[in-house]
Image: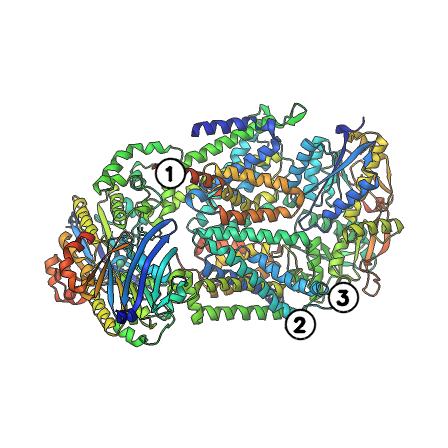
Amino acid sequence: AGISTDVVKIGVLTDMSGVYSAIGGKGSVTAAKMAIADFGGKVLGKPIKLISADHQNKADIASTKAREWADTDHVDMITGLLNSGCALAVQKIGTEKKVISIATGAGSTTLTNEHCSPYGIHYVYDTYALPKVAGGAIVDTGGKSWFFLTADYAFGHSLEKNTAAFVKAHGGKVLGQVRHPLATSDFSSYLLQAQASGAKVIGLANAGGDFINAVKQAREFGIVQGGQTIAGMLVFLSDVKSLGLDVAQGMNFATSFYWDRNEASRKWSKRYFAKTGSMPTMNQAGVYSAVTTYLKAIKKAGTDNPDAVMKTMRGMKINDFFSINGHLRADGSMVHDMFLVEVKKPSESKAPWDLLKVIKQVPGDEAFMSLAEGSCSMVKK
Amino acid sequence: MHLSYQVVLAQLMLGLNIGAFYAILSLGLAVIFGLLNIINFAHGALYMLGAFVALLGYNELGPLLGMPDFHMNYWTALLVAPLVVGSLGVLIEKTMLRRLYKVDHLYGLLLTFGLALILQGVFTNYFNVSGISYNGKPEILRGAVNLKFMMFPTYRLWSIAISLAVCFATWFVIERTKLGSYLRAGTENPSLVQAFGINVPLMITLTYGFGVGMAAFAGVVAAPIYSVSPIMGSELIITVFAVVVIGGMGSIMGSICTGLSLGMLEGLTKVIYPPAANTVIFFMMILVLLVKPEGLFGKEQ
Amino acid sequence: MSAEYILETRDLTKDFSGFTAVSEVNLKVRKGSIHALIGPNGAGKTTVFNLLTKFLIPSSGSILFKGRDITREKPADVALRGIIRSFQISAVFPKLTPFENVRIALQRRLGTCYHFWKPVSSLDILTEQAFELLDSVGLKELAHHHTEELAYGQKRALEIATTLALDPELMLLDEPTQGMGAEDVGKITELVRNVAQNRTILMVEHNLKVVASLADRITVLQRGSILAEGEYDEVSRNPQVMEAYMGSVHA
Amino acid sequence: MPETQTQELLSVSNLHAHYGESHILHGIDFSVRRGELVTLLGRNGAGRTTILKSILGLVGRRSGSIRIAGKETIKLPPYRIARLGVGYCPEERGIFSRLTVEENLLLPPVVKSGGMCLEEIYTLFTNLLERRKSMGTSLSGGEQQMLAMARILRTGADLLLLDEITEGLAPVIVQALGKLIRQLKERGFTIILVEQNFHFAADLADRHYVVDHGNIVEMIPMEALGASMERLSGYLGV
Amino acid sequence: MNRKLWAALFLAGLAAPFLIYPVFVMQLLCFALFACAFNLLIGYTGLLSFGHAAFFGGAAYVTGYLVKNAGLTPELGVIVGTLAAGLMGYIFGILTIRRQGIYFAMITLALAQVIYFIALKAPFTGGEDGLQDVPRGMFLGLVDLGHTYHVAGKPLELNLYYFVFIIFCIGFWIIHRAIHSPFGQILKAIRENEPRAISLGYKVERLKLLAFVISASLAGTAGATKSLVFQLASLTDVSWHTSGEVVLMTLLGGLGTVLGPVVGAFTVVALQAELSAFGSWVTVVIGITFVVCVLSFRRGFVGEVLEKIRTRPPKPND
Ligand SMILES: Nc1ncnc2c1ncn2[C@@H]1O[C@H](COP(=O)(O)OP(=O)(O)OP(=O)(O)O)[C@@H](O)[C@H]1O
Ligand SMILES: Nc1ncnc2c1ncn2[C@@H]1O[C@H](COP(=O)(O)OP(=O)(O)OP(=O)(O)O)[C@@H](O)[C@H]1O
Ligand SMILES: [Mg+2]
Ligand SMILES: [Mg+2]
């Protein structure tokens, strides 16, 4: 029992320079710092230390860093982890070295299925929950026929596959899809194909820059004006901000978090804004929540022994400005309520960051894949 | 996907749009290569810089000057960005590249590779890599033109037209004027051309400035279409290299034609087999290398 | 009696996109002779050399070396058959020492050029011979200098030593005395005369003194075709040759 | 002799030149009067080419004084020197392969009035007329040499620096060049000729400078040539 | 003196894991071998390949896949990876070897991009996530390379370390030998004057191709080993940034020097490790290093030192 090496070390491993740096990046580090400071800087009388590094979205860098942190820095918990490759690699090393990893940005459901780990937590969202929340809702409001623009890699495929399944489950149909290479700058060809398909909804199973480019160019080719709807499967606040309301208005998507949802979220987000100059994305808020939850668990368990901490966390209810009705499941999935949001019209927006309105709150157990559906070997069925 | 002739035509138009960028970039590379014997790896980064000059001019310059409502407009950017980047090019040439002419050309490649990393790194540090929208598209270029087989955004039509105009003007100057013959001669034996009374160092400096200015120009033209991001040039440049290899470094016209036709090839691929869109040019390159190792327009060594 | 001739060309022709640089040349080089190829500038002499050594591909016609058709072979194969050329512009390996230059050539005979697992010391058996060759062209003292630093004439001499190292049956020399001072010209002439023993030499040369003193037989080329052929005295009196090439110079 | 002073088109004094680390010319002094033809004789590597290049500023580093038509040029960049009316025919010919023969010919800008026109040049060099649309380096060695000469006659340069122009040329052409140079001299060109072919040079020159190891060791006027023959052959190995 | 230097370095290599974080040292060794292999090509044939990551990463994938899915022992995995890289090198070589200089660089770069595409798309590579969970396995079926010793409280993967160290030594020795072989002599000659080498009867293209294949194979060895050390083969390994990095390593240490690439690799890898917390400034620093190196010490660290030694007493040979 007690604190090993007399210090609790938390590592934030995130994308500081690559395509996801706006989503996580320095903001995630700031969020983690805030969490530690708010916790008092100490747990069980021992100092909490934060280290951070850039995984550049490269699995090898993430794995090297995680290994080094585990071997030489004696890190207790690693969070951040913005893409699935990095998250998988770190979770793997965590398993080997008994270091807890809490992925806040990666989407892949494999983290809690084939590759689930006793020390791995998937905290914010996954490629099952997002489409389930968004896809179903959109079909229900009349978007019956779909055409997908899919980023051609595992993450995109998985988003597309899951969304298609929900679309069909709600009585919609999928007219076709086109797979575009990751980091495409010109979507016009694909958009024309989507347009030609006549589908009501063009589902964007991609993220970040690809998403932004696709939306912008859809507007250029008059797709939305032509009566088709664009639906993003993974959209961050920063994406909406960078697109501008003019372009993004009316779009529906799913998110785990929106700053302007209630008093608690507003209060924290404003503090965050004061430090960083932008409102938090769901990842950044997720990092804060994850660090706080972890520290609470240590306090409760009275030790930073990873097995004990994991056990304690599994028994906790996680409720804070980020997580509503959250709880950590045996497969590592942190199940919490999700939201369906809509981008405001420019006329509705009163402030620079007044971008979204929450349409619907979806209970976690409804949004996330059930344990029974999953394939985690640690779950006894 | 059903391949009607409309679809094919539409995709060819879009391909032409990409091709125009390939052409103007590979042409810039060819011009620089011609006189400095340097493959300008920084070309992509300078293209990005051009787009950023337009973007920052539109978004930030006003506030910076204390005039929040001031936006540097698109037309000004079209002029200013090449000038700014061209001047940076002049500086780079005068302080760095100049010292490398006597050594193996590979060092030029390496130096500009380093510069590309620096530029990209600095911008990545301050700007969002997932891209920022440029909102300065001028009013008259908004909307779309009916081309019978498709509605084509006016701006894209303009971007094709202006890029081609720049390409052909460059071609004319180099192949058909006296200045061009100085350039071509300077390529081979600068010190002798100098001995004939021509200010070669100045010519070299200006050529580099002009070449990178062209990249910046392409950047401004691209800004309203794509998101402006620090990494917008880094992948593009490698494709442009492949274009250059396929075309053969020898000729200016070669760069233009190859750029355009490869753009169209890429456009078609996007309908036929989209996943290969980013790579079709590289496969094309292998094919060309097997059949005509010196490139389509290249001369045998 | 083709055994008498080591090299023969039959209607050898080279077109450069419309311009015929070499046109139906029938050249016969007798074994063991020194044969000079002369002619006005642009007559096609260097082109003939390039054709013979396969640096250019003939447009038509054939080349026979010791009765065997070598028209379609690659440059390196032609060299392996024993036809070695020198270049109009001096060709040495500037960063290697003269000793290494010669050894590179000698090394070919060992057949170990692909043997990346053998130590360099496996080449030591060539050292003695390399020095002999350097000695024969008067470069023994400079064997371990930087080749780049050698004087022009010394580089030419080194080039010849390197060529000799391959013990070629047929040596092609492209203007061996070009750009040399009178002193060096004499030396090179002497050298060529020495090495010509028991091998055949085909040379291009503008220096008529050298030609006169060395060549057994002369072919005059003009505008890609053979204008005249014969011994020096005979050729130099030929009025056509005088008009096209020699002008009023009499040796 | 104030008169000769004014007539001096080129005067070089205490000229030092370096290529990188190596010091090639060690304080050269000589001068050439307007309309005069002088040769620089010497062995291979004596430094003659370097003298020509130094006049044009094409060497790594140079110091001393070089006056062209009274103007100090030691600090000027090469292109400014050329514009004073200096034409250079380099020893490696320097034909541009990416330019056609005609473009090669037209390349050097006119620096002074009084240059030959294209027709005149083509009558002098008929080979070139025939091949004027060909690319520069598809020419044979000799043709290139002609082109290199022809090219500077157009520009109006009146101080010609000719480096080994007979090298690799057929005897007939050498003779033709001899004639040409005599003509040029009559037209008032000032010529510095670097020549390996002593017999060619001897017939043409007003004076000979003998260069050895980066120094000028002797000046021999034409009249004194016969008398100095022995010493000369010592220098040159003729 | 040389012999002493080698012995000292060898001993340092043996002792290293006890002094420095072993995974880091293993990473250094892999990259050092990669850089040495690369140097064989550029330093001794003058060919700048901007696509060497294809061999490094390609082999990493092949080895990773076979060790993970076909149960190959690690040493066999490395050997097969090496052969695969050699084969790739042969194919690349056929396509590129006739080109030189900048052209060669661009073509290799573009070809490597094709390999990148394959690594991205092929069913067995794990796409964007990379090929993860590569087991380290049992060396010769006997020694567990995954075993961690605890010495003075530090976890040391000594078995793996010495496995990597031996591979490095063998690879390094092969390169060293190739450079100082009859073959190496001819490479030098070709680099100096290619037409002349042809006219002496050398089949220049074949010789260059052989050099290319050796270089590719050893780059493959490095990549294969790396996939075992990190239990991962990813797109980074085949990306053009990696190709650029190996150029930097070699340049920084000294082109065409035996130890240069090793020194360069150490510098770059250490630099990256030190700067990893600074995000994109790493790219900037690497960029600046490139620029400074090209502008002011083109011979590289080792090259500059050797030059100092060389210019002092003029020794005739070597
Ligand atoms: N670029 C250079 N770098 C270093 N040394 C050089 C360079 N060019 C010439 N030299 C050296 O300068 C000296 C003089 O060379 P220069 O070319 O002037 O001789 P030259 O009298 O013209 O002889 P040649 O008959 O060979 O043309 C020679 O020793 C030569 O090696
Ligand atoms: N690659 C080429 N393309 C086109 N024409 C060429 C090419 N090479 C040579 N020629 C032409 O062929 C003719 C013969 O050239 P070649 O170099 O064989 O002449 P040469 O007899 O060696 O002359 P010189 O004594 O001047 O060196 C010339 O008119 C030349 O212009
Ligand atoms: Mg010739
Ligand atoms: Mg000279």
Q: Chain of mark 3?
A: A
Alpha carbon distance from label 2 to label 3 = 23 Å
Q: Is residue A313 visible?
A: no
Viewer-proximal residue, C123 or A130?
Answer: C123
Above or below residue C39? Residue E86 is above
Alpha carbon distance from label 2 to label 1 = 63 Å
Q: Is residue A1 visible?
A: yes
Q: Is residue E40 left or right of residue A140?
A: left
Above or below residue E299? Residue B205 is below
Evaluate if marks 2 and 1 touch, with contact meaning CB atoms under 8 Å apart. no
Callout 1 crowding tier (Cα within 10 Å): few <14, some 14–19, many ≥20: many
Q: Residue C216, percent across and down?
A: 13, 52
Callout 2 crowding tier (Cα within 10 Å): few <14, some 14–19, many ≥20: some
Q: Chain of mark 1?
A: E
**Residue drawn at the location 44% of the way across and 71% of the way down:** B176
| Same chain? Circles 2 and 3 | no
Instruction: Please name the amino acid that badge 2 sits on.
Output: Leu
Viewer-proximal residue, D37 or A91?
Answer: D37
Q: Residue B141, percent across and down?
A: 66, 72
Instruction: Please name the amino acid that badge 1 sits on.
Output: Phe
Of the numbered discs in the image, which one, if any, rests on residue B141?
2
Q: Is residue A327 left or right of residue B194?
A: right
Question: Residue A139 sits in which quadrant?
Answer: bottom right
Q: Quadrant of the N terminus of chain A?
A: top right
Residue, disc 3: A227
Q: Secondary structure at mark 2?
A: helix
Residue, disc 1: E183
Q: Residue A219, percent across and down?
A: 72, 65
Cβ of mark 1 under 8 A from ligand 1: no
Instruction: Please name the amino acid that badge 3 sits on.
Output: Gly
